[in-house]
Image (tube, rainbow, N blue to C red):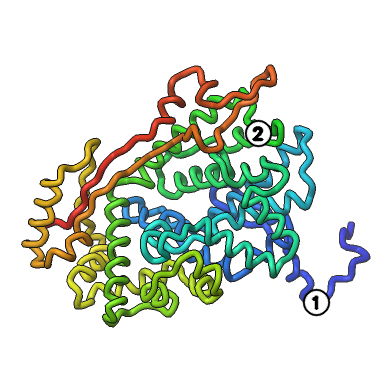
Amino acid sequence: MNLIKGTQLQPNQHRNNKKKIINDPVYGFITIPDEIIFDILEHPHMQRLRRIMQLGLSHLVYPGANHTRFHHVLGAMHLMSEAVATIRRKGHEITLEEERAVCLAILLHDIGHGPFSHALEYDIVNGVTHEDLSGLFIDRLSKEFGDDLGRANLIFKNEYTKPFLHQLVSSQLDMDRLDYLNRDSFYSGVSEGIIGSDRLIEMLAVHDGNLVLEEKAIYSVEKFIVARRLMYWQVYLHKTVVAAEHMLIHALRRAKHLAKQGAPLFATPALTMFLQRDVTLNDFKSDPQYLDAFAQLDDYDIWGAIKVWQHHEDRILSLLCSGLVNRNLFKIEISKQPFPVDRISLEKELVRNHFNIDSEGLDDLVYHDLLMNKAYTNDKQNINLLMKNGEVIDLAKASDNLNISALAHPVEKYFLCYPQHH
């Protein structure tokens, strides 16, 4: 039986088929649910995410953790399609336009990430967050793609009439977290992060316009929160990763300091723009050249610069960069108490003498700060359980063991990081 009888296929018309299937190592086959989603995926702003690693420098500890942000947003979009199907099946209306918009919102939620995003946010883009930049990119794409993106933007900003749609994109039980925990576990090989996303999605429901979980999901969600906590200590805040990230932060900070003094520095045009000036959120909003330049930045700009900076005449910059390129990372100590001032001063003195560096550069070689791990936050869009009697209870109160209440308390650890000096 000829299923396409009566439809005359034009030459090359098959190339316009946008309902593609993508093979994902975590979920198997993912279907692109809508033509506009295909068009957005093909957009240069989205393709940039293929050149930005999801886990930054974590591959220096877990060599398999080389997956990209593009990978992650595709996975989150797949989970969103499943969540929409579940909520619909339970009798809550989600129109086709809303489904398209919420899938676009999750697809675009990370579009504002730069390379090594958290390191970049310290200095290179002056405290402008990736959420701010995602909003600006979505605004820009809305002008190109029209109403669908406008609706996605309202959901992204939590200004849409159905709050649960925003909560699927950004909350303590959003599709972003469900994807990155499983994906980061898969690629890092740290199995503690694996969560039953299928079961959690199956238990989603809506009550008074807000996202809730059915009562029977309580143990699955406990496992999800414990997994998140373990992934933070084992992967995201692994002490060696923290040491490498701070070396990168200070390499970029040092480079910016030198660039502003007029020192010659190899960098791509986009990176040069951010090294030579302090670009604020107002600049991004008022002058499109800054967002254009940011859209050109990816991991390759940073690695290309760092490889060359290894040989820079500035001792501090070359020390940091050769350490990153050759994985000769700084020593890091973790403590439950802040490090005493005299201990920090001692390390600075030892480093100053060993490397023969003047005092003003020491802050770029010896660092101390606080690491905080909040697995579940009581004050931010709580995970609510819908009990069988119709009552809605916050997860921390509903739990019949102490796990969740204990996990709601932030765990704080202090670190001291410095180059080997013996």
> For the residue marked with disc 2, what is the amino acid?
Leu
Q: Which residue is mark 2?
A: 204
Quarter of the rendering occupied by the C terminus: bottom left
Question: Is 366 on the left or on the right of 87, as rendered?
Answer: left
Disc on the earlier residue, 2 or 1: 1
Q: Nearer the viewer, mark 2 or mark 1?
A: 2
User: On the rendered image, what quadrant is the N terminus found in?
Assistant: bottom right
Tell me which amino acid carries mark 1: Pro
* Rendered image: mark on residue 11: 1
| Residue 155 image position (x, y, % from top left) | 66, 50
Q: Tell me where residue 63 appears, x and y as whole percent.
A: 36, 54
Q: Are marks 2 and 1 in contact (CB under 8 Å)?
A: no
Q: Residues within 10 Å of mark 2 (few under 14, many from 20)?
A: many
Residue under the image location 19 percent in, 56 percent down: 366
Does residue 367 sit above or below 268 in this rendering? above
Q: Nearer the viewer, residue 190 or 291?
A: 291
Dot 2: element: strand
Quadrant in which residue 363 is drawn: bottom left
